[in-house]
Image (spheres, rainbow, N blue to C red):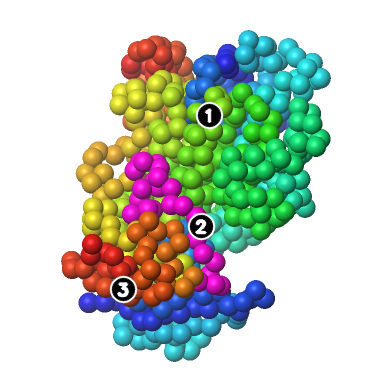
Amino acid sequence: MNLLEIINLTTHFQTPDGIVQAVDKIDLSIREKETFGLIGETGCGKTVIGLTIMRLLPPTATVGGEILYNGKNLLEVSETGMRKIRGEEIAIILQNPTTSLNPVLKVGEQIAEAIRLHQGLNKHDAKKKAIEMLDSVRISSPSRRANEYPHKFSGGMKQRVMIAMGLACDPSFIIADEPTKGLDVTIKAQIVELMKEMTEHKAMLLITHDLGVAAEMCDRIALMYAGELVEYAPLDEIFEKPLHPYTIGFLNSLPKKGLVPIPGMSPSLINFPDGCRFHSRCDYATGECKQKHPDMVEMGNGHFVRCFHARS
Amino acid sequence: MLEVEGLTKYYPSGVIRKQYAKAVDGVSFKIGKGKTLGLVGESGCGKTTIGRLILRLIEPTAGKVLFDGIDLLALKRKELRAIRSRMQMIFQDPDSSLDPRMKIGTSIAEPLKLQGATPKDKIGQKILELVETVGLHPEHINRYPYQLSGGQNQRVVLARILAMNPDLIIADEPTSSLDVSVQAQILNLMMDLQSTFGHTYLFITHDLDVVRIMADHIAVMYLGRIVEIGKTHDIFNGAKHPYTHALLSAAMMEPAAGQRERVILKGETPGPTDIPAGCRFHTRCIRREEICMLKDPETVEVGDGHYVACHFV
């Protein structure tokens, strides 16, 4: 059963330089209780997908397509209706906890705010619940910590607070955007463990550029390149049988896999190259790749790839 | 090429009750000519401070730094200036390492003029040469840093460094702000340059996977001290310090890795103002015993050039 179904989603931004096609005709579905990893490099549009689902885009954005959540198209929900869905049914854990937390509000109050708004608890009960949440993300002496301001928390602890806030209203779907960015390796391992445990019975879209984190947490993985998905498959398939040259290049450029770089740079999201968007960096590119834009095709086992040469 | 002995930097803090933040606390290591030492540790462990102390961008509290047999700490300002051209540093964020109002060509010309080894009429040609060595195109010379990507700017930084023709390069997280595919490009370039020019690298990073490829030796730092140092192979295959174990197991990858036993450290690194008594790692260590809280472990040799500071080796 698909909890979230994204059909032909397009998010464009008007800018002085032209139209930025950050998300371009994306189809994606997330099942219940599944963790789906969206992997891509800086500027490929992955963060915009998360913001589009939450409808948190600036007015310069135009969105097309459908986002069906439990069968309901989120793009047609009223702003009031959306406010009810945010936090209560779908929560987002943003990157950069330092800038995402309000520096002049006590940590406990920030968590309690969401609880008060969505669950109608009074101030006292909401605070109690906030302290419980801090305890559940393993912040020691939570009742004292709830009365402190964010600057007293370390990066790892702020990330715990973000998780507590995201999960406070028990949403069924979570979008986590680079939840481990900027954390030290030992702290990163702690956060990954915590998130795995706290989201075991929830569906999650994990947006990251860190394949290691995705490998630890995800059931399925999609690779995004220049505004579109180029490959998605169950976790093991991506690692054992990557099919798209970008996926293969991405894996090979990891230090553990030999540090073989992909030549060139990602194209800008304003002017896509003709044909396959990856062709100028691809070793396998032929005349066909330069002219025609490949479609997503299924290769069996729920493995989809956007490449003319995937079969060979 | 570089020999560091008992290098220490304390920062005073506290007005009434004098305290010291022990950023670097008695660090010693050697790097052979043309070799790479990877200095690994988490944020706040003092690894960046070490890089700056070696170049005397900040003055050490105590210790010795020998560069090619010359005691850097005994040098006067002028002498230091002369020798600094042989030691260059590359920083984490390439965009802020370059002057945004200077064209790339001008940026590269600056060190050439400073060093003075290139005749004025040859500078243009030398810039072209450098730009090509680092894998950029001649048309980039007339662009500004904002018109280039992060990876390209890091290449410009490398070209500037090559202009000085240094022996030692201190690289402080040179790729941690770059995407993996670009990181691979820059690291490959750095390795190529090393084999062409015979540079000695001190490679400072938090990424164990990166030093595994780049470094001949690895030093693991925790709260201002090196807790383990040895050949790259020995560190990855026979790590002795519990902190090194934790770092190694925290580095994630591949689905299969989930099956192996993982050491997840509890708690966070204490600050450099309140370094725990005894072994500084004991508050987070899984092997902690009473002795660890009382006595600071000595650094002992456990193999060829492999040193560990732990009571249980």
Three-letter amino acid code of the residue under disc 2? Met
Q: Nearer the viewer, residue A237 or B224?
A: A237
Q: Does the magenta stretch include residue A251?
A: yes
* Percent x, y of residue B28: 54, 16
Three-letter amino acid code of the residue under disc 3? Met
Q: Do the residues labelled 2 and 3 touch (CB within 8 Å)?
A: no
Q: Mark 3 points at which residue?
A: A296
Tell me the element at label 1: helix
Q: Nearer the viewer, residue B152 or B14?
A: B152
Question: Residue B65 is drawn in which quadrant?
Answer: top right
Q: Are marks 2 and 3 on the same chain?
A: yes
Q: In this view, does A243 lie above or below B20?
A: below
Question: Residue A58 is drawn in which quadrant?
Answer: bottom right
Q: Mark 1 points at which residue?
A: B196
Instruction: Look at the image and tell me whether residue B33 can be seen.
Output: yes
Q: In which quarter of the image is the N terminus of chain A?
A: bottom left
Q: Is residue A210 above or below residue A258?
A: below
Q: Residue at x 46, y 73 (%)?
A: A274
Q: Mark 2 points at which residue?
A: A265
Q: In which quarter of the image is the C terminus of chain A?
A: bottom left
Q: The magenta stretch spans which residues? A: A247-272
Q: Is residue B249 above or below residue A197?
A: above
Q: How far apart are marks 1 and 2 (CA)?
A: 25 Å
Chain containing mark 2: A
Q: Residue at x 46, y 25 (%)?
A: B219
